[in-house]
Amino acid sequence: MNKKLKIVIRVGIVSLACAALVVGYFIYLNKKNAKTEEPDTELTEAEIIETTDFDKNYPETPRAVVKWYNRIATVIYNNDLGDVKLEAVAEQERKLLDDDLLKLNPEKDFYKNLEKEMKENEERKRSIVSSEVSDSADVLYKTVAGYECAYLYSYYFGKEGNNFTRTYQKFCLRKDKQGRWKILTFEKVPQEESSFAE
């Protein structure tokens, strides 16, 4: 009887081991098939911009706002929209602008101006290669007419045809009632005036 019991136990252990191998292999195949069936989900820059929820995740600092503005401007300026509509990206840009600036740029005119600029950039082979924003230490904070304002600079390295260009802009951002920094003004300035002066 001991002999029979030992044989039964050995057969049981071998059966369990075989069953575990079969189940393990089945799980491995399912995971492998699931991975190969998943589509490539890497988003383009335009898709990232389009899907960013500024209502829930608004940039916290003036620098972060201008960095987002530059990302959006680069996609529009370079006509890198892909399948994303210009209106979707431009709408995200408008969320970064102060109400007073929005009043000066009604939505319909805003889109038309962007389309015109994109066409002109394509004809003149203009693009933004890269951009930089002032360091945190270079951001100047002031109270103007009872509003908290922040002043900073951005540098753009661009290309037109075979020539490279450098452009500097000064930004003024104002805190709104929700405590969000919004772009109130921006203007082109000489390098010597910017925080990127050599």
Image (tube, rainbow, N blue to C red):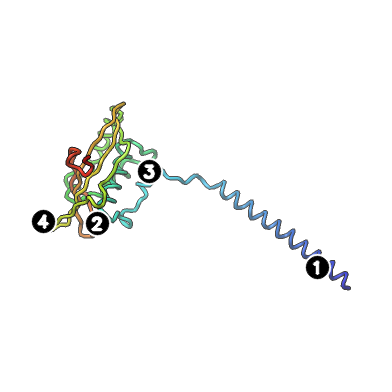
**Does label 2 or label 4 sit earlier along the sequence?**
4
Cα distance between the residues tagged 3 and 1: 62 Å
Cα distance between the residues tagged 4 and 3: 38 Å
**Does label 3 or label 1 sit earlier along the sequence?**
1
Cα distance between the residues tagged 4 and 1: 88 Å
Identify the residue at horizontal 74%, vertical 63% (top origin). Answer: 16
Q: Which residue carries the number 4 mark? A: 145
**Does label 4 or label 1 sit earlier along the sequence?**
1
Cα distance between the residues tagged 2 and 4: 17 Å
Identify the residue at horizontal 77%, vertical 64% (top origin). Answer: 13
**Does label 2 or label 3 sit earlier along the sequence?**
3
Res. 95 visible in picture: no
Three-letter amino acid code at the position of disc 4: Ala
Three-letter amino acid code at the position of disc 1: Ile
| Marks 4,3: beta carbons within 8 A | no
Determine crowd level at label 4: few under 14, some 14-19, many 20+ residues with C-alpha closer than 10 A.
few
Res. 19 visible in picture: yes
In the picture, the quarter occupied by the N terminus is bottom right
Q: Of helix, strand and loop, which one carries label 1?
A: helix
Determine crowd level at label 3: few under 14, some 14-19, many 20+ residues with C-alpha closer than 10 A.
some
Q: Which residue carries the number 1 mark? A: 9
Question: Mark number for residue 45?
Answer: 3
Identify the residue at horizontal 47%, vertical 46% (top origin). Answer: 41
Three-letter amino acid code at the position of disc 3: Glu
In the displayed structure, would residue 162 be above or below residue 3? above
Instruction: Please tell me which residue lies in front, 59 or 190.
Output: 190
Q: Of helix, strand and loop, which one carries label 2?
A: loop
| Marks 3,1: beta carbons within 8 A | no
Residue 30 shown left or right of residue 138 in the figure: right
In the displayed structure, would residue 145 be above or below residue 71? below
**Does label 4 or label 3 sit earlier along the sequence?**
3
| Residue 116 at x, y percent in the picture | 25, 33
